[in-house]
Structures are given as structure tokens and as C-alpha cells.
Image (cartoon, rainbow, N blue to C red):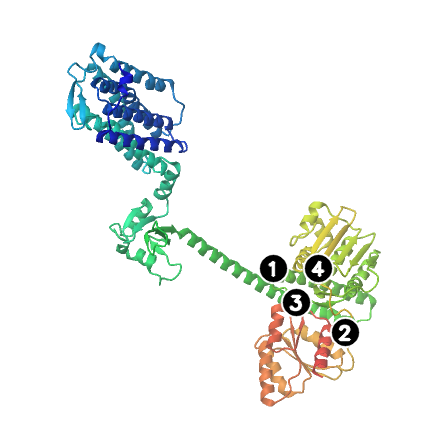
Amino acid sequence: MHTPQCLTLTAPHMPAYVAMATFAGVAVAGLTVLRKREFHGRPYFLIGFLATQGWLLGVLLELLSSAPECKMWWAEISYLFITLLPTAWCYFLYDYSHARSDAMSLPRLASMIVSPFAIVLLATTNGMHHLFYLDGTKIIEIEHGIALEYLHGPLFYLAAAYLYLFLVASIVIVLRSLIRAQPAFRPYFLTLFLMTLIPSAGNVAYVVFGISFYGFDPTPFLFSMVMILLVRMILTNKVFDIASIAQSYMFLDAEQPVAVIDEDGKFIVTNPSFDILRAETGNDGAVYLADWEELNTLAFDYTQPKGSLLVAEGRSYELRVIPIDKPLRGSQSCMGWMLLLKDVTEVLQSNAELGRALHRAESANRMKSQFIANMSHEIRTPLNGILGMAEVLSHEITSPRHAEMVETIRQSGDVLLNVLNDILDLSKIEAGKLALMPEPFDPQELVRRATGLHRLAAERKDVPLIVEMPSGNGPRREGDPMRLMQILNNLLSNATKFTDKGSITLRMDNPADGNLVFTVIDTGIGMTPEEITRIFEDFEQADGAITRRYGGTGLGMSIIRRLVTMMNGRIDVTSRKGAGTKVEVSVPLPVSDASAEVQQPEPAPAPSTILTGLNVLAADDNGTNRLILGSLLKRAGMRAVLVTNGREAVEKFPDGEWDVILLDISMPEMDGLTALEAIDTITRKTGRKRPPCIAISANVMADQIQEYLGAGFDACVGKPFRSTDVLNTIEAELARRQ
């Protein structure tokens, strides 16, 4: 062997330039793939690159050598890489197609070391045995110099058979993978199959048919081309990249129909869901979007109403059109569009069901409100009879025992009225119809009124009611005094009800720069932590036994919590079983600007001689209510004409000079609202002055009262009423007319 002499090369010619260019291209591709993140079979892929480079280098040196023995030498040395390349390629294809990343096994390592060196040894010792190349190998003249025309011997064909085993195995691996592959992977396996087939076919053409590249085996050049293409596909995530596979899955396996059209509207690619939809709608022959008129209109007819849907086979689809921009910025048109059809059938059905459920809930809420209003009316009407007759009796009887009985009746009626009012308040709060009515008020006056109402009940149990307030008047506040009074009444009522010994304390803190705070402390039965958590729930008390022993609806604390929340306040309860309870209510009410200027209203005068001699026309269909009205009006010195319905009141109106008209709202034949309208018509026609008209009704929810006042009533007295309620209202309306 003459290795130093074989490094003396001739000037390059065209085949050598082609070999050098191919070598450089493979080198660049190899360096590029080294920076690529890990992929399956990467070690064998890189070994294959080195083998390709080695084979190309051997071809180049063979081309540039002038001596025949040097050409033979480089050809023999190249068998190291000729053997290594199909071996590494076969292992790469197996690992790549099976997504394996195992460490290189010993048999594989041996096959890539022992076999190449063994075949190189057979080739380089040919001068000793002449079995690799036969003696008939000769020099021939070609266009760019000389070349060897090899006459292959049995060892060459043995080596070739060994290498063809790996090439055939590579083809079988890829072909088998192509057959078994998921649809998303088949294009990749087809690419690998062609990449394996091309150099294999080139090698067979060279060995069997003598087809060469300038007298050389074209296999290394074909493998080089395959390697460069494969590197490009790996770098652009086109082959077995998990992201591109996932994207393909998202498209092919998407349940929602997806299609891509070009700028002419031709379907370029569609997923199976779109194909199914196209067939179901009878548009399976549609090649262009225009062939599917309904979808084309929905996609590009901008006069379509917003929210238009594609309806097919009982299902509804919402269309989204996404333009696919051209590569260069500023392009006025796009390459095509992606059509995404989202099945919204279940959403529409769910929305429809929600709408029906909402309608049912609203209907149920209206029925509930109507039921409560009716219940209020039906309970208040007889309750008015109970309380009213008790008041009438209190003025008629003289026996102390009988007077005590009547007072018991009145107290029982008041309890029933409080229960009814609690239920109505809760209903108003839940319906959002309870509105706070802020006005300037004096917190100390509020405390004095609240304690005055409950002091007698506490004293009957020998339980002192202690009031603690800061010295001085303190600032006036802007808030709803009626609802604050309701809160204090509930708290003091509970404290009085559940305290049999010890004391009850109402403490008020009214700093000018802080919240208004009311604290009620009692020494009553107390509560456990579990019972405290239940007292704010509707119709709940701390313990069922409490309801049996003390009574009550269980709504008081629930209403307090809701009212305090409406005022943006806070309520805190601390208690210990058997040791009493402390309830603190803190509300952030602003200090009133009218602190000093506000004049306290003078107390309304007691029924006096200003009512004496008044003529009153009163209509009520309930005989008991007429009896009560007649009695209290007579005691006040008024002359009353009582009728049974609105029609009779309208008929009686022209016959007298009436100072006041009292009308029940719910009456047969003609209700109070219709009667008022008829009376107004009479006064307009006759020029008479209409007297104050007062509604007396058991329907006294806030919206109902507003309806009465809006219809023209001057005031409203709710049932059950006390005589002072009616008389004070009459006096107030008469005073307003003066």
C-alpha cells in the first residue's frame, strides 16, 4: 500500500466538484442536526451522517487520484463507511418508527464495529486472495480521466448480501410501520419509505445493471440527498415531531368539523367530521364552497343576522371563519380560509332549558308573592275583627276581670300580627322590594322609644332593662329609623323572651367619627356555637325545644341579618349556654348635616273636637269591620254612613256633604279603586270639592300602597288597625287640606 503517494491528488474536474458540493451539503446538514433537540434514533442518525461523509470522501479521493492502485486503495477503504451506512440507517428507522430512545445495545454496537472492519479487511487484502475483486478488474478511459471497471468476486457478493439484508430490513420496517400506522402518521412513514427505497434502488441499479455516476456507485450521492431532506423535515417539525403530530390529531380527530379552502373557495383539506357533515347534508360532492350554498352564505354573506347558525340533521353549528394570511406583510388578500364549525346544539338546548327553568322560577316567585299577598289579606281581615272588637269591648265593659280577658285577646292578636309582619318583611327582602328610606333621626330618641316598648314586659318578669348611652345628645344620623327600630325591637324582644332572671342591657355608642353601634346583652338561656350558626337561617331557632317553650317563627334574627346587610353593617353574636347572649349591631350611617336645624315634630294631638260632627262615608264588605269602624267613629263624635261595597258608596256620594271617605280596596260588585275613580268623575262633572279619600285595606305590601296612592287615594290605613291609626290619619289629612 502506498498511502502517502495516494494523497497526491490531481486537479479537480466536474465529478469531483459534484462530490465536494455534496460533501459540503451533508456537512452543513450534519452540523445543523447536532443542535436539534432529542428525537428517537438520533445516535444512529448521526452515525449514518458520518458514514455518508466518509463514503463521499472516499469517492472524492478516488476521483482525484491518478494512479490506478490509489483509486483501488480508496475504494477499498470506503467499505468501512459503505458497510456502516445501511446498518446505522436500519437501526435509526427501527427506533424512529417505534419511538424508542434506548441506550445502544452490545449486539448493535458490535454490528457497527466488527462487520465494517471485517469487510474492509477482506477488501484491502484482495491482493492476497483476489476473491473480492477478480483479476479481470481493469482501467478504462472516461471523459474526465481514468476509472476502474471492477470485476466483482464472491467475497464482494457475500458482503453485498450482508448489506442488502439491512437495506431489505429497512424497507420492511418502514413498510410494516406504514401499514400499521395511525392515519396521522402515514404521510411520515410514506416519506421514510421513499427515502429508503431511492438509494436502495440506486445501489441495485449499479450492482446489477452497471448504472453509475461518472463510473462510480450513485448510492452515496442518493443517500446524501435523502439525509439532507430528512434533516430539513426534522428541523421544520415535519417528521415524528410530537407537536406536529398533536396538531395533526387536533385536526383529524376533532369532533368539530374543520375545513380549509383556498382563495378560490376550493376545499383543500377537510377533517373526517366535516366530511360526515357534508355527506349528511347531501353536499358530499361539493368541491368548492360555492357548491354548498347554505354554508357559503353563512361564511361570506355579511348581511346575515348576527348569530346565524347552520342547521343539519337536527343539530346546530356556529361558524367561525379564520383568514390564512399570505407570507408577506401588507398583502391585501389572503391565501385562503379555515372554516371551524362548532356544534352548539347542547348549548342551545341547555340555554333553552335554563330559560324555561328561569321562567318557572319567576312564575313560582310570582305565585309565591301572590300567595303571600292573598294570605296577608285573608289573615288581616279577620285579625282586624279580633283586635277591633277587642278594642270596642275595652270601651264597653267595666269588670276588671273582663278587661283582663280582653287585653289577653288583644295581646294574642298582636303576636299573630307580628308573625304576619315578619313573613311579609322576609318576602319583601327576598324579592328585593324592601327599600330603605333614609332620613335624619336621633339615635337616642330611637333607643328611648324601643326601651319604652319593652320595659313593661321586662319588669313583669322582674328583669331590669338597663340603658347605657354616652352623655350628651351625640350626632344625628342619616338612615332608616323605622328599620333600625325593627332591629332593636327584635333584639329586645328576644332578650326579654329568653331572660327569666338577671338583667337586660341596651348599650349605644354613637361616635361622630365611627359607626353607630347597638349592643344588647342579656343573662338568659344562652346558646352553643352550633346553635348560633342556625339562628340566622329562615324559620330556625337555636333549638326545637325553644319553639315549643317560647314560641316564635324563627324569622327575627334572619330579618335582622338581612336588614343589617342592606345597611352595609355587621352583626356579631357571642353566647355561652346558660350564661346569656351578647348581640352587637354596627352600621356605618353618615352623620346628618341637619343636626341642629331640624325641628322635632310636635306630637300629633289626641283625637279632639276637630273630629266632632264630621260626616264620614265608609265602605267595607265585611260586617265586623263595619261594626268596628262605626264604633270608633261614633266614639270620636263623627257621623258615619256605612255601606257594603264601592257601588253603594258611589250611589251615596251625591246625597251628602262628606268630610272624609273611607274605602276598603277589595269589595264585591265594585272595588275601592273603581269607586274612587267614579267619585272623581262625579266631582269633575259637578264641580264639587272632593273630600280626603283614605284606603283601608288588608293588602298593604309596599307596591300595593304605592298603587293606591298613585290611583288618587290621599292615605292608606292597613288592617288590622287601631282606632288611633284611623283617627290620626283622618286628622292629618284634614290638617293638610287646611
Identified by mark 4, the residue type is: Pro
User: Which is nearer the N-term, disc 2 or disc 1?
Assistant: 1
Quadrant containing the N terminus is top left
Q: Which numbered mark, 2 or 1, is in the foreground of this view?
A: 2
Are circles 2 and 1 on residues that touch, CB within 8 Å? no
Residue 665 in view in this figure? no
Looking at the image, residue 282 sits to the left or right of residue 250; the answer is left
Label 4, label 1: how many angstroms apart (C-alpha)?
23 Å
User: Which of the two labelled residues, at mark 3 and mark 1, occupies the earlier sequence position?
Assistant: 3
Where on the picture, by quarter, is residue 399? Answer: bottom right
Left or right position of 33 against 688: left
Give the residue type that dot 2 points to.
Answer: Pro
Q: Mark 2 points at which residue?
A: 601
Q: Mark 3 points at which residue?
A: 380
Q: Residues within 10 Å of mark 3 (few under 14, many from 20)?
A: many
The local crowd at label 1, few if under 14, some if 14 to 19, many if 20 or more residues have their Cα within 10 Å, is few
Marks 3 and 2, the one that precedes in the sequence: 3
Q: Quick check: 225 above or below 152? A: below
Give the residue number, with chain letter if any, for mark 4. 588
Gap between marks 3 and 2 measured at Cα = 31 Å
Q: Nearer the viewer, mark 3 or mark 4?
A: 4
Residue indicated by mark 1: 430
Residue 718's mark?
Answer: none
Picture quadrant where residue 13 is located: top left
Cβ–Cβ under 8 Å for marks 4 and 1: no
User: Which residue sits at x=28%, y=48%?
Assistant: 268
Task: Say whether disc 3 or disc 4 marks the residue closer to the N-terminus.
Answer: 3
Q: Locate residue 592, reporting x and y percent.
A: 73, 67
Q: What element carries label 4?
A: loop
Task: Give the image location of residue 183, x and y in percent.
Answer: 31, 38
Helix, strand or loop at disc 2?
loop
Secondary structure under the numbered disc 1 in the rendered image: helix
